[in-house]
Image: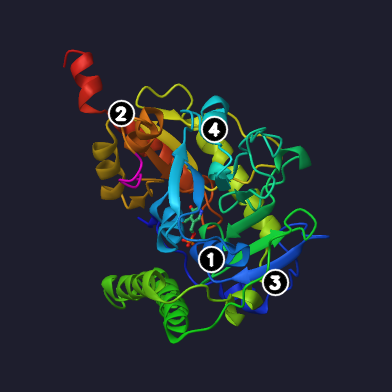
């Protein structure tokens, strides 16, 4: 039974591939390539020259990695509400946007567009900037009207099998106070890229010959890479190896595989009593990160899937900094969500297997409700 999910294998094909393509129409925008989403955020903060104590407004549905750079630079972090279908609560955003706010960030979750009110929020200072986090959605094609960021960034590593990589785009006209910072290489960054590349290569080998060595060997390399990524000094630029791989990847093939797999799960899980898909359709242009769903009995569903070698990530366990009492909707989602893998490594047979596992799962709660 083959494994589904977890870290990507090494994309050997892209070393020799002929798919020269950039990942987004960046025409007319200035661009910088950094090592990760975290590096990109550090770089943006430094390039904007934000002072310690500056007030920044982040969505209440987010991961630790997005908050960390703001805390590291001593920012005064506040959150605005996000609804249960992961849209911005406009009234709450409006209330919290005060003239001291220097930066507002929003996220396009799971590849789907998030509607953002845009700059004309009356109480916002003219010098305040809107950051659009497209780490889940940089392979999606949204209407121009759906992009409201002054600065747009994406971590490439969520959707693409790269050892590192992120991009920041901005227009010189819309952000006057922007002075691109010089990112620097460090031994720690080189080690993070090296460990991840070796881990991914070993995983490719292990998937071909599972008995060749224990799984913990490649998992150890991924672990070392994550540890290094957390600790090296930021911002670091994107590595040469990732730049080369990125240029030659079959991105169109990845997008269509993800859409096909997502559609398959959507119809296979239609009417399920155990889970509720977070998105009930797949709009034109969306390239999904995965298939997020809500399950009342998530711990047991996770256990059920993992026992059958399906490894769905949880996006996200919210950082403790987001108060439960103030943001109940974000915590409602966070307590129930998991993401079924739909990426380019898998086909319809794999999706049928995942859907079968979800459908065969019966939570304690439903059994009790049925009186069994
Ligand atoms: C939406 C979003 N933004 C930013 C990040 C940070 O990216 P990275 O892990 O490359 O630092 C992540 C991932 O952790 C993410 O999911």
> Under tag 3, what secondary structure?
helix
Crowd tier of the residue under label 4, counting other residues whose Cα lies within 10 Å: few below 14, some 14–19, many 20 or above: many
**Circles 1 and 4 in contact, beta carbons < 8 Å:** no
- Establish whether ligand 1 lies closer than 8 Å to the Cβ of label 4: no
359 to the left or right of 189: left
| Mark 2 or mark 3: whose residue is earlier in sequence | 3
Residue under label 3, please give it: 247
Frontmost residue, 212 versus 335: 335
Say which quadrant the N terminus sits in. bottom left
Q: Position of residue 106 (x, y in %)?
A: 57, 44
> Under tag 1, what secondary structure?
loop
Q: CA distance from mark 1 to mark 4?
A: 35 Å
Q: Position of residue 171 (x, y in %)?
A: 76, 58
| Mark 2 or mark 1: whose residue is earlier in sequence | 1
Picture quadrant of residue 6: bottom left
Residue under label 4, please give it: 93
For image coordinates 47% across by 68% down, the residue present is: 9
Q: CA distance from mark 4 to mark 3?
A: 38 Å
Residue under label 1, please give it: 161
Question: Is 122 rendered above or below residue 271?
Answer: below
Say which quadrant the C terminus sits in. top left
| Mark 1 or mark 3: whose residue is earlier in sequence | 1
> Under tag 2, what secondary structure?
loop
- Establish whether ligand 1 lies closer than 8 Å to the Cβ of label 2: no
Q: Write down the region rendered in magenta.
A: 317-322
**Circles 2 and 1 in contact, beta carbons < 8 Å:** no
Residue under label 2, please give it: 296
Q: Position of residue 243 (x, y in %)?
A: 64, 75
């Amino acid at each position: 039974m083959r494994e589904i999910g977890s870290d990507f294998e090494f994309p050997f094909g892209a070393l020799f591939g002929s798919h020269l393509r950039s990942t987004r129409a960046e025409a007319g925008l200035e661009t910088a390539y950094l090592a990760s989403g975290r590096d990109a955020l550090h770089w943006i903060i430094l390039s904007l020259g934000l002072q310690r104590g500056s007030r920044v407004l982040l969505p209440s549905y987010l991961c630790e990695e997005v908050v960390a750079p703001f805390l590291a630079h001593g920012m005064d972090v506040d959150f605005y509400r996000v609804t249960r279908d992961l849209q911005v609560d406009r009234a709450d955003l409006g209330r919290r946007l005060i003239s001291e706010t220097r930066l507002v960030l929003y996220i396009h979750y799971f590849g789907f567009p998030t509607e953002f009110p845009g700059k004309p929020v009356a109480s916002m200072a003219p010098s305040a900037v809107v950051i659009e986090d497209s780490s889940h959605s940089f392979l999606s094609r949204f209407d121009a009207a759906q992009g409201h960021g002054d600065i747009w960034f994406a971590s490439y590593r969520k959707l693409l099998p790269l050892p590192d990589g992120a991009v920041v785009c901005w227009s010189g006209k819309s952000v006057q106070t922007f002075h691109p910072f010089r990112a620097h290489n460090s031994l720690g960054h080189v080690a993070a890229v090296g460990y991840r590349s070796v881990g991914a290569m070993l995983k490719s080998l292990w998937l071909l010959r599972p008995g060749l060595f224990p799984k913990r060997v490649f998992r150890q390399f991924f672990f070392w890479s994550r540890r290094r990524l957390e600790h090296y000094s930021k911002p670091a630029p994107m590595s040469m190896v990732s730049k080369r791989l990125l240029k030659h990847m079959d991105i169109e093939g990845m997008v269509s595989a993800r859409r096909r797999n997502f559609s398959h799960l959507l119809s296979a899980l239609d009417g399920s009593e155990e889970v509720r898909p977070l998105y009930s359709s797949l709009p034109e242009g969306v390239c999904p990160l995965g298939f997020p769903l809500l399950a009342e009995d998530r711990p047991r569903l996770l256990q059920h899937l993992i026992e059958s070698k399906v490894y769905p990530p949880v996006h996200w366990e919210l950082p403790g900094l987001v108060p439960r009492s103030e943001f109940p909707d974000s915590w409602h989602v966070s307590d129930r969500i998991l993401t079924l893998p739909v990426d380019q490594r898998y086909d319809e047979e794999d999706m049928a297997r995942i859907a079968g596992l979800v459908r065969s799962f019966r939570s304690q709660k439903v059994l009790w409700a049925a009186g069994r």
